[in-house]
Image: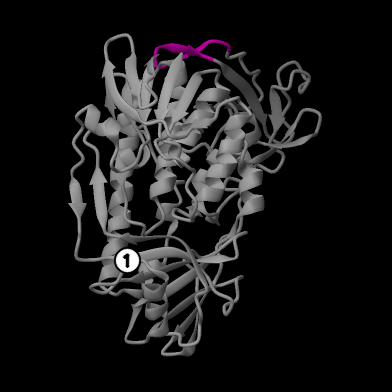
Amino acid sequence: MRVLVVGGGPTGLTLGIDLARRGVQVRIVDKAERFFEGSRGDGIQPRTLEVFDDLGVLDAVRETGAAQAVIRVRLDGRPAGERWMTEPREPRPDVPHPNPWVLGQSQLEAILRARLAEFGVRVELGTELVGLEQDEDGVTARLSTGETGRFDHLVGADGGASFVRKAVGVAFPGTTDETYRVLVGDVATPDLDPATGHWFASAANPVAGVILTPLPGTGLFQYATPLGEGDDASLEAMQAALDRFAAGVRLTGRGWSTVWRPNVRLAEHYRVGRVFLAGDAAHVHPPTGGQGMNTGVQDAYNLGWKLASGSALDSYETERRGVAARVLGVSTGLLRKYAEGHEDAFRRGEEGFGLDITYRGPDTVGHRVSGDRAPDAPVRTGEGKRIRLFDLFRGPHFTRLTFGGGAPGTGDGAAHDGAAHDERAFTVLGPGEMPSGGHGGDDGRYVVDAEGHAHAAYAASPGDSFLVRPDGYLA
């Protein structure tokens, strides 16, 4: 199978890694002449951290980034306490990554490209898709290099102005508010503690102030403030806005910057024949809530195993478009609070973590109130080695967990959605339980839930069986 991915941002890179590890021949092209440099989407949500764990990049993400920093507030030049965008939470057995992680987007993309290179795939810069035609058997893509290629599927991960979306005639309804603008950019300042965030504003209207949050590993801050009429994205404009609230704090350099306008859009379809849309090509979010990049990564994670197996392709639009519509509602609600001057517009709750996504109806047997995500939990192998359920799920296979002493099936060639799939089967034993035959662990298909965490996370009784999809959701 051959797949062309158009767009080398986080969405396209995630999809490329997922396809390549499944043995799919994948190409990623991007019309940009050089890789993006800047923070842009710098917040990685808990569910996305779990995706990165499965894809083999979590250690690098953690090493390069940092936890969200507390924000020191100064109103009218006086200290006014501290704020968290997200209240820190302790890890739980079923939620090992409970807090968002901060990492500039260009740093994240470099990590993903390095992982992709391990599969022999690189992003082809300066290569623009200029035309496509499809038929029942495949997609013909014409590139700016003069090459014409034939692919089984094509995925547009080419941003809000997506050429792919326009080429297949998918409408992109929504709104853009030209009357409200926010200046966002990366800045250097020697006058602020780089370990914390800083919020400078007036007590009468705190939201109209300037917020600077640290960007790990760069020595820079991400700067954000509402723009007045006639202001631009220059360093001088940034300094002038800051001077209104924090005289004496110097900005000594500027990297990436942009003037952001509220833009909320959702594609009418995610699939047209053999062409798919993902990330900003399918949905554009306000930055409030930190959801755009995360939703795109999870689009790719949902689509990868389906493309590789050739099954459940129709469910991609059904599952992911519904999630995007819900997330857009959350982000837009926070944006409305921000525009109206509510201080709590910067606070983010668990609804943005991505852990409560559900792909099934509420009356489905085995439905979990917190969503369909298959939880993690610590267990032991039959030989006593400590592992986690996520260790069993990691990889491109389905995983069946059966709770109780019965022997697990082999699972080879198990059917799902009408197609055969590789399925790994495990029996999860409780304290004091023995597998059938009185011994276990020899074939690695028994694990012991000595602390009861796995049973609790799955609300499982003896004999219950759960099938976990390759993207970590319950089938």
**Residue segment shown in magenta:** 412-421
Q: Residue furthest right?
A: 383
Q: Where is 158 relative to 70, above or below?
A: above
Tell me the quarter of the picture where residue 434 sits: top right
Q: Is residue 419 magenta?
A: yes
Applied colour scheme: one colour
Residue drawn at 69 percent across, 43 percent down: 451
Residue 232's spot in the image, x, y percent? 31, 68
Pick the front one: 188 or 5: 188
Whether residue 349 sits left or right of residue 421 in the image: it is left
Q: Within the image, what quadrant is residue 392 found in? A: top right
Is 414 located above or below residue 389 in the figure?
A: above
Q: Which residue is mark 1?
A: 182
Image spot of residue 231 (x, y percent): 29, 72
Q: Is residue 134 above or below residue 45?
A: above
Question: Nearest the camera: 359 or 106?
Answer: 106
